Image (tube, rainbow, N blue to C red):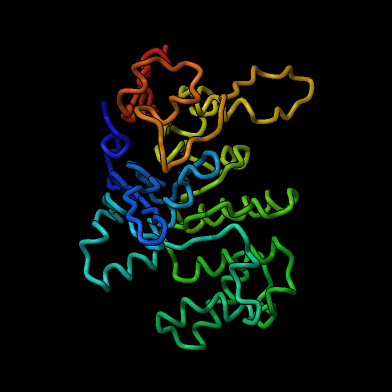
Amino acid sequence: MNSPVEAQHDTPLLEVRGLKVHFPVRGGLGRKNNRVVKAVDGLDFFLRKGETLSLVGESGCGKSTTGYALLGMLKPTAGEIFFEGKKLDSQDREGRRIARDRFQIVFQDPFASLNPKMSIGDSIGEPLRVSGTDRRQCRARVEELLELVGLHPSYYDRLPNQFSGGQRQRIVIARALAVRPSLIVCDEPVSALDVSIRSQILNLLIRLQRELNIAYLFISHDLSVVRHISDRVAVMYLGHIVELAESRELFRQALHPYTKALFSAIPLPDPEIKHRRRLILSGDLPSPLNPPPGCPLVTRCPNRRPECEKALPPLRELRPGHFVACGRAEELEN
């Protein structure tokens, strides 16, 4: 059966094969320690131009680590990353720099993302100045970006503390757009905002994607947000992708036990509807320092069998575009 990167037919914007990010654990004074934290342990996925792929899962599952590895903020332990068909680590330094310029990020906390002593115009224009854009062109571009994200160009000389949280996130988005990226990693971009502001920022991201043909790798634990913005969704657990499918298909019929447990916890919007059956996984998320043998969910899965402890199940395509990593995959489909 196909893997996620084998199943696609056109050349994707981004392609990830076997991505691993392991962190060595230091021992005490004078002690050697060969243990590692397997934060990301073998991911395969792709992202098309103008598409939103969301990574979801519990805290500590490796979502943000994946995004940082793609951006070069963390060095992968293993794996290959292709951007527009070219392998990133096989290019020369200038080629990697140009490719990385087309990867940008929007962090969770907009205030922490901005220098409090720098005007928002200077913050947005910083990537342009680094790339050699002259001052006049830089100012014109920044004013254009402010309008694009719904802010007035006259705000150029104001400081970040003069803006609300939602406005600051618009500023951060404008800065990410400055160098005309093809891909933006959105790392929990609305979780620090008031509920009333979240939909505004999400709608802004959707509009910008439609107008500029930008791809998003959207990292979030909020499934209602993910459902609203995603084209496809990858569910992560303990450094692995356990299920990946089109958003509508996944929310209609999740197959993996972990995905079912996640989705069963989503609040129902209509109080008149009877509560769905809640699937609760017993136990806590295992440590990536000491993962269980075989399937990563084996210690919490309500459907586990002895054979689940023997081997890591591959991510297999059960339906067109719907991938599941479970040794009992065929049973889940029926």
Q: Is residue 157 above or below residue 218?
A: below
- Label tally: 0
Question: Is 321 on the left or on the right of 194, as rendered?
Answer: left
Q: Nearer the viewer, residue 16 or 146?
A: 16
Which quadrant of the rendered structure holds the N terminus?
top left
Residue 17 quadrant: top left
Q: Nearer the viewer, residue 88 or 181?
A: 88
**Position of residue 118 measured from the top left corner of the image (x, y, whole percent):** 62, 81
Question: Is 82 on the left or on the right of 289, as rendered?
Answer: left
**Position of residue 131 measured from the top left corner of the image (x, y, whole percent):** 40, 80
Residue 106 quadrant: bottom right
**Position of residue 113 measured from the top left corner of the image (x, y, whole percent):** 58, 68
Question: Is 299 on the left or on the right of 82, as rendered?
Answer: right
Which quadrant of the rendered structure holds the C terminus?
top left
**Position of residue 36 measured from the top left corner of the image (x, y, whole percent):** 36, 48
Q: Nearer the viewer, residue 186 or 297?
A: 297
Could you tell me which residue is drawn at 32 percent across and 42 percent down? 42
Could you tell me which residue is drawn at 38 percent across and 46 percent down? 47
Q: Residue furthest front?
A: 30
Could you tell me which residue is drawn at 52 percent across and 54 percent down? 186
Q: Residue furthest bottom?
A: 135
Could you tell me which residue is drawn at 40 percent across and 15 percent down? 305
Q: Is residue 5 above or below residue 308?
A: below
